[in-house]
Amino acid sequence: MESFFIYISMFLCLLVILALYRGIAGPTVLDRIISISAIGTKTTVILALMGFIYNRGDMFLDIALAYAFLNFIATLAAAKFFRSRKSIIPGSNCPINKGGE
Amino acid sequence: MRYIIVFFILYLHWILWSGKFDAFHLSLGIISCALVTFMSHDLFIERKKLSPKIIVEAIRFIKYVPWLLYQIILSNIHVAALVLSPRMPIEPKIIRYKTKLKTDIALVTFANSITLTPGTITADIVDGEYVVHALSRKVADDLMTGEMEDKVAQIFEEE
Amino acid sequence: MSVLAVIFILTGVFFFTTATIGLLRFPDFYTRMHAAGKGDTLGAFLTLAGLALYNLHHGFSVDAILMSIKILLIAVFIFIANPTATHAITKAALNCSVKPWENKETSK
């Protein structure tokens, strides 16, 4: 059963790398934010799985919860930050929207 | 009353996450929970007077959750089929949905339910109108039947 | 019970996979939001529920039950937090009037 968890974790790591492609290439800043948020959700699950692989569930679950909180707060803060920028409007020579068509 | 409820919720979480039951950790938990309760009790429970209605609402909400889960699984299968089909037959558009809900908690519950179910995302509420981004025409029609809104209204606004 | 847990985890991983493929394939920001916001939420919920079930297969001691409750609490938190984050980002995009992509074939 432990090797099953290891394979699942490796597969999730592969998915993280795939999602990271959107984070690097994504045309607008908002694409990058959702990519990072999705990676954070996967990382929470990977941390919980690692708790089972190493038999230290009590410790890794606390880390997973902290990671979930941080991921949520970071996403909200980034969304709030870019909402208050007027420069994100297309056509206003904003670096965020270059190539966003 | 609010102080007591918030304190017990916080203390339950303290015990659950610390996992230790000796006197030192328990008394430390009492002190810190009391501090947090004193500072932020009005953030947790906003309404001034608590009536027994809140228990009825909680029970109705728990009954609503399995239906919501079923809808979420249906919606995920729909989105997965859209993702995996080679031609991707999607027609995204923004629709406006007029709501009849009044209270804050009903609005929030309905907005989160919309986001979680068939291919729709709530973006904003403007003057009692939801701005919803729908992924395909089928899911937009599903939302317009208003079945989910009736269920949410039944939970929170029925006497 | 561990068979049920394996089924839960595999279903969750399947939804994770479709979410990631959707994130890569969909044409614009809003549609990617659909894939990432929904597939990840259900995937995480199912995987964590499977882990909580697997944790109980040795027997129902107090420690095991506490740990399962912790895992379920993480799942519930993700369930509440993910749609909220999705609203926030979509609202930011609408406020900045990012134009949604339209299907050229079906819209006239």
Image (tube, coloured by chain):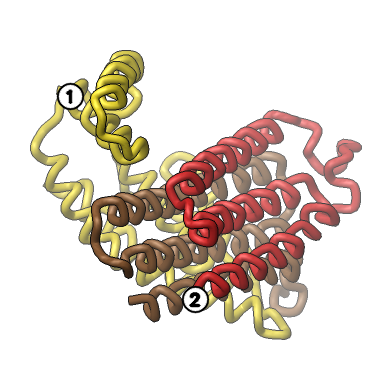
Chain colours: A red, B yellow, C brown
Residue B15 location, x and y as percent? 28, 35
Give the percent coordinates (x, y) of residue C7. Answer: 44, 79
In the picture of the structure, the residue carrying the numbered disc 1 is B4
Chain on which label 1 sits: B
Image quarter hosting the C terminus of chain C: bottom right
Q: Which residue is mark 2?
A: C11
Amino acid at the residue labelled 1 = Ile
Q: Position of residue B16 (x, y in %)?
A: 31, 40
Q: Residue at x 55, y 74 (%)?
A: A4
Residue for point 16% across, 40% down? B54
Q: Residue at x 32, y 33 (%)?
A: B14
Side of A87 relative to C26 (left or right): right
Name the residue nearer the viewer: C61 or A7. Answer: C61
Residue B130 shown left or right of residue B59 in the figure: right
The local secondary structure at tag 2 comes to: helix
What kind of residue is marked 2?
A: Thr
Mark 1 and mark 2: span between their CA atoms? Answer: 41 Å
C105 left or right of B112? right
Task: Name the residue: 62% across, 67% down.
Answer: C19
Quadrant position of residue A74: top right
Give coordinates of residue B58: x percent, y percent: 19, 48
Q: Dot 1 lies on which element?
A: helix
